[in-house]
Image (cartoon, rainbow, N blue to C red):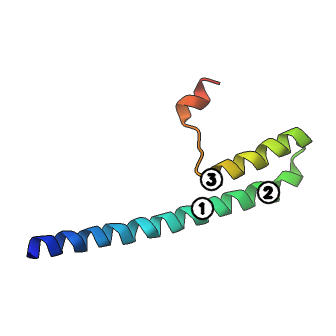
Amino acid sequence: MRIVTTEASELEAIHKELKIMNQRLASIKDMIEEVIIRDLPKVKVSKKELKEITESISEVKRGRCTTLEELRSV
């Protein structure tokens, strides 16, 4: 019985740490978005580019990301 209890407590600790990491990641994503949006007025971008940037930010928020390999092939 002790082994099962230990495994359960280890799983709970892992779950807690993953939850904390997800919260930190969300904060980092929010900061990146804020920096991009804040600095956009300093950079001349077309309406089309601005739309693409906004859509990309939305995709990141939904968890849709591109790998480095995919970027290299473009």
Point out the image quarter for the N terminus: bottom left
First in sequence, mark 3 or 1: give its number. 1
**From the viewer's perspective, is 9 left or right of 24?**
left
Q: Residue at x 57, y 30 (%)?
A: 70
Instruction: Name the quadrant containing residue 68.
Output: top right
**From the viewer's perspective, is 47 left or right of 33?**
right
Mark 2 to mark 1: distance in Å?
A: 14 Å
Mark 3 to mark 1: distance in Å?
A: 15 Å
Q: Residue at x 24, y 74 (%)?
A: 9
**From the viewer's perspective, is 44 left or right of 60?**
right
Q: Residue at x 71, y 45 (%)?
A: 56
Mark 3 to mark 2: distance in Å?
A: 18 Å
Instruction: Name the quadrant containing residue 66.
Output: top right
**Residue denoted by label 1:** 28
Residue 12: which numbered mark, if any?
none
Secondary element at image label 1: helix
> In x, y percent, where is residue 24?
53, 66
**Residue denoted by label 2:** 37
Residue 62: which numbered mark, if any?
3
- Check the image and report above or below for 74 versus 39: above
Which of labels 3 and 2 is toward the front?
Answer: 3
- Kindly identify the amino acid type of the residue bearing the numbered disc 1: Ile
First in sequence, mark 2 or 1: give its number. 1
- Kindly identify the amino acid type of the residue bearing the numbered disc 3: Arg
